[in-house]
Image (tube, grey):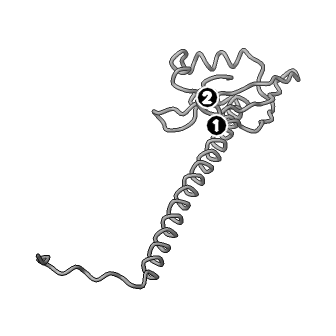
């Protein structure tokens, strides 16, 4: 019995097949490598952005305390801290404490929940305190806010 159709011809020269497979494999490696590189670059950029923002927020907070702009410093606190005190209470509390004269910030460190920024704060009277500011991302404003160390 004869087959109802003729069998397709086979490739006698497999060179083109191997070239096609080689080009396909090279493209696959290139795409996967590029994707891995892109993800790595994204992680590094996010890390750098968090560190920069953490430093900027702590600097603004301490500048507000130094300049007597307690409302501005209050607004840089996270929602949980702001819920425990009013701006007036915060201002009164800051007025009773020694005033910030100057400060030096340390390199920010990423934590499991946010960013930690250390600061050596010099106050009126010449005392220097070391403070650790813990910053978390506030979903309401989409920015880092101080939740501990104030």
Residue labelled with disc 2: 146
Vertical arrangement, residue 140 with respect to residue 45, above or below: above
Q: Where, quadrant-wise, is the C terminus in this rendering?
A: top right
**Residue at position x 77%, y 27% from top?**
100
Which residue is situated farthest in the right direction here?
A: 126
Q: Nearer the viewer, residue 60 or 18?
A: 18
Please indicate, yes or no, whether residue 140 appears anywhere in the rendered image. yes
In the foreground, 78 or 60: 78
Looking at the image, how many numbered discs can be counted on the residues? 2
Residue 73: name its quadrant: top right
Q: Say which element carries label 1.
A: helix
Q: Observer-nearest residue: 16 or 124?
A: 16
Q: Which residue is mark 1?
A: 57
Classify residue 79 as left or right of residue 4: right
The image position of residue 72, as x and y in percent, is 60, 32
Q: Secondary structure at mark 2?
A: strand
Asked whether disc 1 touches disc 2, contact meaning CB atoms under 8 Å apart, the reply is yes
Q: Is residue 102 left or right of residue 55?
A: right
Q: Residue 76: in sight, yes or no? A: no
Judged left or right of residue 50, residue 128 is: right
């Amino acid at each position: 019995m004869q087959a109802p159709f003729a069998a397709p011809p086979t490739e006698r020269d497999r060179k083109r097949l191997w070239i096609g497979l080689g080009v396909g494999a090279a493209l696959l490696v290139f795409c996967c490598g590029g994707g891995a590189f892109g993800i790595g670059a994204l992680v590094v950029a996010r890390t750098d952005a968090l560190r920069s923002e953490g430093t900027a927020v702590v600097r603004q907070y301490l500048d507000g305390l130094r300049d007597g702009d307690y409302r501005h410093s209050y607004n840089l606190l996270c929602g949980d801290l702001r819920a425990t005190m009013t701006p007036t209470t915060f201002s009164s509390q800051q007025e009773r404490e020694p005033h910030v004269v100057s400060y030096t910030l340390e390199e920010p460190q990423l934590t499991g929940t946010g960013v930690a920024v250390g600061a050596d704060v010099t106050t009126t009277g010449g005392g220097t305190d070391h403070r650790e500011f813990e910053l978390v991302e506030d979903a309401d404003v989409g920015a880092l806010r101080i939740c501990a160390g104030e």
